[in-house]
Amino acid sequence: MKTPTTQLSGYTPSVSVTVCGRTWTLERAADLETLWQAMTDDDLDGDERLPYWTELWPSSIALAEQIHADRKRLAGKTCLDLGCGLGLTALVGAWIGARVVGMDYEPMALHFALRNTTLNGIDPRSTPLWTIMDWRTPAIQKHSMDMVWGGDIMYEKRFVEPVLNCIEYALAPNGRAWVAEPGRTVYKFFQNALQKRGWQSRLLADRPTPALYEQKCPVPVRLWELTRGAVRD
């Protein structure tokens, strides 16, 4: 994996990263800390709408590389990006020829994802379908997705059941899901839930991934492929 073009020492109104053989530039509202400090009590409801979407996480970078590496299999497939944030992985999917639905819970994330579509020269005929969606109540046709993917979406135990329910609902019978995660302990709970429901989980890639912000060591991102029953290539 190539190192991001620049490592940031502070907030910038856009971030650029070189992955998949090209440079992607993603506009955003502000850094996580700034948006977090601006939140009011109304924002901190039961859902705790924390603005994680405004950052580009190492798991998304690793996932983008995997999408590009598997572009021949994904071209023409219908794919769902769970928690698309600024849009990197959905944009890479559209760029390699997949039909992508990019969903996020936060309207502001989708505002910037749409801006980033144009900014990165994605053909309007293949642009992702950006949609506000709660994975607890997926607003898509049942079993309509060939592939579901998500980068660093499993960071709280309470997300285990809703995320797995959404994947089960969205995936076609012969579909696959990719989950990229940076070694969080909570992922073990997700693996246990997968096993109880008859899913198979295999480690597809283990990619130490440089973060966009200055730090001593790359983030140990692991990418898992989830399948249920016999899956044909």
Image (cartoon, rainbow, N blue to C red):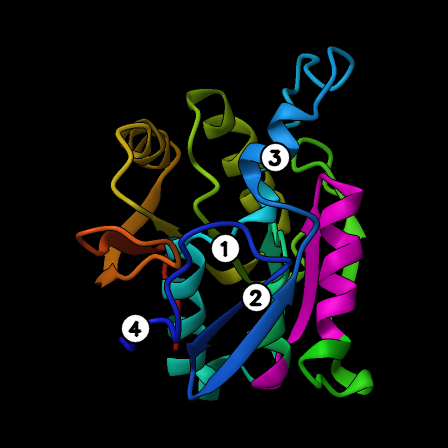
Mark 4 lies on residue: 3
Decide: is 157 above or below 171. above
Of label 2 and label 3, which has the lower sequence position?
3
User: In this orientation, does residue 90 appear?
Assistant: yes
Q: Nearer the viewer, residue 41 or 14?
A: 14
Given this view, does label 4 or label 3 mark the residue nearer the observer?
A: 3
Given this view, does label 2 or label 4 mark the residue nearer the observer?
A: 4
Q: Residue at x 61, y 83 (%)?
A: 95
Residues drawn in magenta: 95-117
Label 3: few (<14), some or many (≥20) within 10 Å? few
Q: Residues at badges 2 and 1 in contact (C-beta under 8 Å)?
A: yes
Q: Is residue 187 left or right of residue 228?
A: left
Given this view, does label 1 or label 3 mark the residue nearer the observer?
A: 3
Q: Is residue 142 left or right of residue 2?
A: right
Mark 3 lies on residue: 34
* C-alpha separation, residue under disc 1 versus residue under disc 3: 15 Å
Label 2: few (<14), some or many (≥20) within 10 Å? many
Of label 2 and label 1, which has the lower sequence position?
1
Of label 2 and label 4, which has the lower sequence position?
4
Q: Which mark is residue 88?
A: 2
User: In this orientation, does residue 178 appear?
Assistant: no
Q: Label 3 amino acid? A: Thr
Identify the image quadrant of residue 92: bottom right
Q: Position of residue 26 (x, y in %)?
A: 62, 66
Mark 1 lies on residue: 56
* C-alpha separation, residue under disc 2 versus residue under disc 3: 22 Å
Decide: is 182 above or below 67. above
How many labels sit on residues? 4
Q: Label 4 amino acid? A: Thr
